[in-house]
Image (tube, rainbow, N blue to C red):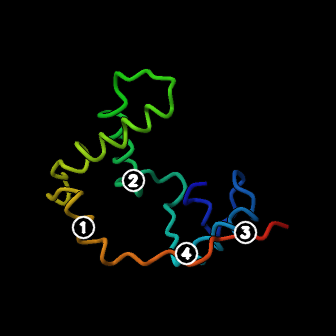
Amino acid sequence: MSCSTGSAKTSRWVPRRSKARYRELARFYGCKVDPAPIYAPEERGKVESGVKYVKRNFFVGRDSDDADETRKSLARWVDEIANQRVHGTTHRRPADLFVTEFESLLPLPPRRYEPVLL
């Protein structure tokens, strides 16, 4: 489910009850839902750039049907390459940023989120 499902505006693509469930999930975990406007890709630049980075730098030239092997290779690539480079916007390594931001992360609730399905 994408962040657009958190929008208060009804979309013909996402049923209203899905949006309510998404908002409840966000509320349970203490997250703020801040969806980008529909048909405004320039508003999601940072997220889209990360996806593009992985597609162009990890997946190019790979043609594997083994999901487990791809998952392991991707985890290794993230640790050894993606998180070690100097980021173009922040001018810092993602691994270093995570260490500083880790202290601000809230712990997960003691119980799992259980949606109420009607």
Residue highlighted by disc 1:
99
The three-letter amino acid code for the residue at tag 3 is Pro
Q: Secondary structure at mark 2?
A: helix
Q: Quadrant of the N terminus?
A: bottom right
Residue 115 is labelled as 3
Please name whichever residue, 59 or 16, is drawn nearer the observer in this view of the structure. 59
The 10 Å Cα crowd at callout 3, few under 14, some 14 to 19, many 20 or more, is few
Left or right: 44 with respect to 90?
right
**For the residues marked 4 and 3, what is the alpha-carbon distance in whole angstroms?**
12 Å
**For the residues marked 1 and 3, what is the alpha-carbon distance in whole angstroms?**
32 Å
The three-letter amino acid code for the residue at tag 1 is Val
The 10 Å Cα crowd at callout 4, few under 14, some 14 to 19, many 20 or more, is some
What residue appears at the point 39 percent right and 44 percent down from the top-left corner? 51
For marks 1 and 3, the one nearer the N-term is 1
Whole-percent x and y of residue 47?
A: 39, 53
Please name whichever residue, 6 or 8, is drawn nearer the observer in this view of the structure. 6
Which one is in front in this view, the residue at disc 2 or the one at disc 1?
1
**For the residues marked 3 and 2, what is the alpha-carbon distance in whole angstroms?**
27 Å
Which one is in front in this view, the residue at disc 2 or the one at disc 4?
4
What residue appears at the point 29 percent right and 34 percent down from the top-left corner? 57
**For the residues marked 4 and 1, what is the alpha-carbon distance in whole angstroms?**
21 Å
The three-letter amino acid code for the residue at tag 2 is Val
Which one is in front in this view, the residue at disc 1 or the one at disc 3?
1
Residue 97 quadrant:
bottom left
Residue 85 is labelled as none
Q: Quadrant of the C terminus?
A: bottom right
Residue highlighted by disc 4:
29
For marks 3 and 2, the one nearer the N-term is 2
Q: Secondary structure at mark 3?
A: loop
Q: Secondary structure at mark 4?
A: helix
What residue appears at the point 31 percent right and 71 percent down from the top-left corner? 102
Above-or-below relation of 81 to 114: above
